[in-house]
Amino acid sequence: MQDQSEASPCVALDAATPEVLGDDAIERLRAIAIQHGAVAAGTRIFRAGEPFRAIYGVRIGAIKAIRYDGAGEEQVVAFHLPGEFFGLTGIHSDRYVNTAVALERTAVCGLPYQRLFHVANDHPRLRRQLMRLMSGVILTEQDQYAAMAGHTADARLAFLLLDLRERMSRGGALQDRLRLPMTRAELGSSAGLAPETTSRVFQQFRRRELIEASGRNIRFLDLAGLRRLAVPLTHPGDGSGRTTAA
Amino acid sequence: MQDQSEASPCVALDAATPEVLGDDAIERLRAIAIQHGAVAAGTRIFRAGEPFRAIYGVRIGAIKAIRYDGAGEEQVVAFHLPGEFFGLTGIHSDRYVNTAVALERTAVCGLPYQRLFHVANDHPRLRRQLMRLMSGVILTEQDQYAAMAGHTADARLAFLLLDLRERMSRGGALQDRLRLPMTRAELGSSAGLAPETTSRVFQQFRRRELIEASGRNIRFLDLAGLRRLAVPLTHPGDGSGRTTAA
DNA sequence: CAATCTTGTTGATCTGGATCATAAAAGCGT
DNA sequence: ACGCTTTTATGATCCAGATCAACAAGATTG
């Protein structure tokens, strides 16, 4: 458990700073958080059907949440990046409904739900933060849904790339280069597209000089062009004029 | 505000009975709940961008949550039926992100969020219930997403019909007849399909004798057949062997 | 460093569903 | 009951993307 990288500790519940939660809450969260060591790509954090115990935060790496579609075909439901939480559907069902798999060398931390709930009993601000967190997940989910339903392959992937770009540069300035943690097939699956289509759309983006891409390394060349292409997720009146999911 | 029909009062937070929450909590919830009178089809409960004040529960009727896609095209994000809550994305954003429109003569009740939160301060069980509620919404959203992404029009609509059937017979026994509160176009939009396609799939279902349908009145003739067709949402290990979203 | 396996690319073909167009029904207001 | 509007049905055409297939390029492993 050599935590040289203290990046995105579990305690930073959806960017909740000590000022937001108060020192005591942070302290107690730190006490119940289970910092798991880094695991290799392909490791399952939990499987669908297992009893629900804890919600998880990503510290470093990336997670995919998948389901097995009738014929055993894997379907990607969501990606989870550092600073984000997953496993929340378990609260309702008392079981995990998705299977969570590490996409690369990944470290997560667990917040046992019962204990988390107890801590929240003493900290109204933590309660508020939890509600915000869950609401944010609903929002992201809806954004995703709205962006995929009834739109072209280019629009979907442009949306996804811009979304990943925002989420992969948590806190820091937005990068114009990034290394995708997932395969084309996984990216496609999450957008309801065949792997071949995903690959072809990437080629198209390259030809149009919207991005550079060699393997999983992406470089954004023309953000405006991509945004024009992507499904515009207008959240009117939020003042920031932002277009992609938070 | 003549509430002759006390069906699905706002207080029954996701099927939370007095035994679950305790009498006092129920009492206080009742005190803050705002029972709105029935409104006509087409009435907007709130608009995207408006400041968030309350979450809403459907008492009677039905709601569609919509977004306006770039060109002003309306996209249905979700339907809300009696006993269900909506507007929860506002918690995160402090603004409503969807527009909520009554599909038919509809009565809703509002739970002002700040007050709800205050009540919850005194009632741990209500807090737990709220978390469950939000988690359940995330789950439903994901189910929807997984059911739509990368599946055929038949599969999507079969899923939707079965899902609506379950949700429209809250509590009571499942009906084999039901009256859809939405048009083909709205149904299609929520599944990412063109209205024409929706209509054609309905015809196909009729020919195959899976359903009877005259206008918005549906009669289920062959549930097993529909289920075979629909995207199977296996939630493994939940014991009930249920297939559609909760 | 081969040998193997996974991932990514590209081509050819085929089809499900969008789109365009038109007509028949339902609703609905008066 | 009568127009008027909205919704539903159905046909014809077209195209985006799935599917099948083959291969190139990285990764991984012994």
Image (cartoon, coloured by chain):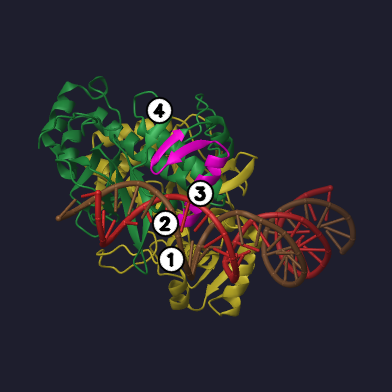
Chain colours: A yellow, B green, C brown, D red
Query: Picture coordinates of residue A134 (x, y %)?
Result: 34, 45
Q: Nearer the viewer, mark 4 or mark 2?
A: 4
**Local crowd at mark 2 within 10 Å, few (<14), some, or many (≥20)?**
many
Q: Nearer the viewer, mark 1 or mark 4?
A: 4
State the mark number for residue A146: 2
Q: Is residue A21 left or right of residue C7?
A: left
* Amino acid type, label 3: Met
Q: Residue at x 29, y 42 (%)?
A: B62
* Amino acid type, label 2: Ala
Depth check: give the residue in front, B23 or B246: B246
Evaluate if marks 4 and 3 touch, with contact meaning CB atoms under 8 Å apart: no
Residue matched to label 1: A231
Give the spatial CA distance, label 1 vs label 4. Answer: 38 Å
Q: How many labels were placed on the picture?
A: 4
Depth check: give the residue in front, B233 or A44: B233
Query: Picture coordinates of residue A61 (x, y %)?
Result: 53, 54
Circle 1: element type: loop
Evaluate if marks 2 and 1 touch, with contact meaning CB atoms under 8 Å apart: yes
Marks 4/2 same chain:
no
Query: Picture coordinates of residue A102 (x, y %)?
Result: 57, 48
Give the residues drawn in magenta, as a range: B192-219
Circle 3: element type: helix
Q: Residue at x 28, y 68 (%)?
A: A240
Q: Where is residue B80, by image quadrant?
A: top left
Q: Earlier in the sequence, mark 4 or mark 3?
A: 3
Query: Picture coordinates of residue A89 (x, y %)?
Result: 43, 39
Residue matched to label 4: B175
